[in-house]
Image (cartoon, coloured by chain):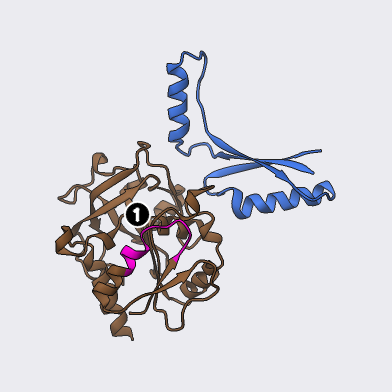
Chain colours: A blue, B brown
C-alpha cells in the first residue's frame, strides 16, 4: 500500500524559508501570491493491512518522528 | 569529573569538547558511540556536543534524539545526572523531550559564525556557578538553526521559574534586537530543565578556554562544573 504523510508548520510559527520563497516568487512576477509556507511530503510504502491499522501505524510514525508536534501538523493520506 | 561525550554520526565538535573537558578537569572523558546502550559506569556528566548529526536530516537533532544511547541519557537525567547539550546537542535535547521547545531556522536565514555576548542570568546552577549572575561572557556561536521557539505558556513557565540561564545581549548586558542575531524568543540562548540538571545552549563555551586562542570566557562553565562534581564525589 502507498501512503503520503504531509507535514506543515502550524500557523503562527515563523517560516523564514517560506517567506524567502514568497519574496522570490513575487520578484519573478508570479501574480497573486498572498503567502507561502514550506512543508514536507513523505511518500511511504507500507505492508498491506486493513486501512485503519495502516493509518494508525502512519500516525505513530508521524507522532514519533516525522513531525515535531510542538511546531508542526501532519496529515496522513492512503493512496490505494 | 567523569564525563561521557556522546558521539553521533555527523557531529564535528566532539574533540573540541573532549579537549576542553580534559584541559579544565584533568580527566580524559569517555567517548560514547550513539549506538551504545549504556553510559560508562560512574559517569557524572553526559555531554552532547555540536555539529550536524545525521546531516541535520528531517529536523536538526531529530534522528539523533531517537538513537539507542539516548535511552541511557534519558535514564541518567531522570536520576539527576548532569547533561550538557551544546548547539546540535541543545537541538537533540529538545527533540528528545529532555528540554522544552524547539530550535528553528535563524530569523534572518543566515548561518551565523562569530563571537557573541551572553548574559549569565543566574549563578546558582551546577553549570553557571563559575560565573556571577548578570555577568556578560563572550563565546563563539556557529549555527543556522538556533532561534528558540516554544508556546507562550512554556516561555512564561521558563521565565517564571528562572530557567533561562543565558541570553543574547549587547557587550554591556543590555537586551537589544540587533544582538539577538537568531531571533530567539526573549533572546534565549540557554535553558535548564525543571530539575536544573539538564542544560542546553546554542553557543560554544568549549571553544573559548585557552588564552592562545583568544578570550577564555567559556572556561567558567567547565571550571564550575568540575569543582561541583569533584566536591560531590
Q: Position of residue B226 (x, y in %)?
A: 28, 76
Residue B212 image-quadrant placement: bottom left
The local secondary structure at tag 1 comes to loop
Residue B90 image-quadrant placement: bottom left
Residue B13 forms part of the magenta stretch: yes
Asked if one can make out residue B33 in the rendered structure from this viewpoint, the answer is yes
Closer-to-camera residue (B146/B157)? B146
**Vertical side of B35 occupied by A22: above or below:** above
Q: How many marks?
A: 1
Q: Position of residue B129 (x, y in %)?
A: 25, 71
Mark 1 highlights which residue? B202
**Vertical side of A40 occupied by B22: above or below:** below
At 32% across and 53% down in the image, what residue appears?
B189
At 47% across and 24% down in the image, what residue appears?
A22
Q: Position of residue B159 (x, y in %)?
A: 35, 56
Local crowd size for mark 1, using a 10 Å CA cut-off: few (<14), some (14–19), many (≥20): many
Closer-to-camera residue (B67/B172)? B67
At 43% across and 29% down in the image, what residue appears?
A20
Indicate the chain on which mark 1 is placed. Answer: B
Quadrant of the drawing holding the C terminus of chain A:
top right
Q: Relative to B15, is B38 on the left or the right?
A: right
Asked if one can make out residue B125 in the rendered structure from this viewpoint, the answer is no
Q: Relative to A13, is A54 on the left or the right?
A: right
- Residue extending farthest right: A50
**Vertical side of B213 occupied by B2: above or below:** below
Provide the residue span drawn in magenta.
Answer: B7-18
Quadrant of the drawing holding the N terminus of chain A:
top right
Residue B122 forms part of the magenta stretch: no
Q: Position of residue B171 (x, y in %)?
A: 16, 49
Amino acid at each position: 500500500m502507498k501512503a503520503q504523510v504531509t507535514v506543515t508548520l502550524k500557523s503562527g510559527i515563523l517560516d523564514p524559508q517560506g517567506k524567502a520563497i514568497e519574496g522570490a516568487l513575487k520578484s519573478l512576477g508570479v501574480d497573486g501570491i498572498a503567502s507561502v509556507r514550506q512543508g514536507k511530503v513523505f511518500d511511504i510504502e507500507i505492508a498491506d493491512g486493513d486501512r485503519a491499522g495502516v493509518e494508525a501505524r502512519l500516525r505513530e510514525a508521524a507522532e514519533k518522528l516525522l513531525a515535531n508536534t510542538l511546531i508542526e501538523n501532519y496529515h496522513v493520506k492512503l493512496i490505494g | 569529573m567523569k564525563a561521557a561525550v556522546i558521539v553521533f554520526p555527523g557531529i564535528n565538535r566532539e574533540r573540541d569538547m573532549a579537549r576542553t573537558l580534559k584541559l579544565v578537569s584533568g580527566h580524559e572523558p569517555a567517548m560514547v558511540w550513539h549506538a551504545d546502550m549504556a553510559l560508562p559506569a560512574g559517569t557524572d556528566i553526559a555531554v552532547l556536543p555540536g555539529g550536524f548529526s545525521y546531516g541535520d536530516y528531517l529536523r536538526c537533532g531529530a534522528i539523533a534524539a531517537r538513537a539507542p544511547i539516548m535511552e541511557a541519557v534519558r535514564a541518567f537525567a531522570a536520576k539527576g545526572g548532569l547533561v550538557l547539550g551544546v548547539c546540535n546537542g541543545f537541538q537533540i535535547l529538545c527533540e528528545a523531550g529532555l528540554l522544552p521547545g524547539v530550535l528553528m531556522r535563524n530569523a534572518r536565514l543566515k548561518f551565523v559564525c562569530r563571537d557573541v555576548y551572553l548574559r549569565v542570568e543566574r549563578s546558582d546552577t551546577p553549570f553557571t556557578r563559575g560565573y556571577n549572575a548578570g555577568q556578560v561572557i563572550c563565546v563563539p556561536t556557529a549555527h543556522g538553526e538556533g532561534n528558540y521557539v516554544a508556546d507562550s505558556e512554556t516561555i512564561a513557565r521558563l521565565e517564571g521559574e528562572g530557567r533561562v540561564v543565558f541570553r543574547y545581549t549587547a557587550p554591556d548586558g543590555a537586551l537589544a534586537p540587533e544582538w539577538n542575531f537568531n531571533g530567539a524568543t526573549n533572546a534565549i540562548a540557554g535553558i535548564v530543565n525543571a530539575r536544573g540538571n539538564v542544560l542546553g545552549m546554542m553557543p560554544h563555551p568549549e571553544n573559548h578556554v585557552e588564552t592562545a586562542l583568544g578570550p577564555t570566557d567559556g572556561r567558567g562553565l567547565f571550571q564550575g562544573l568540575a569543582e561541583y562534581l569533584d566536591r560531590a564525589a
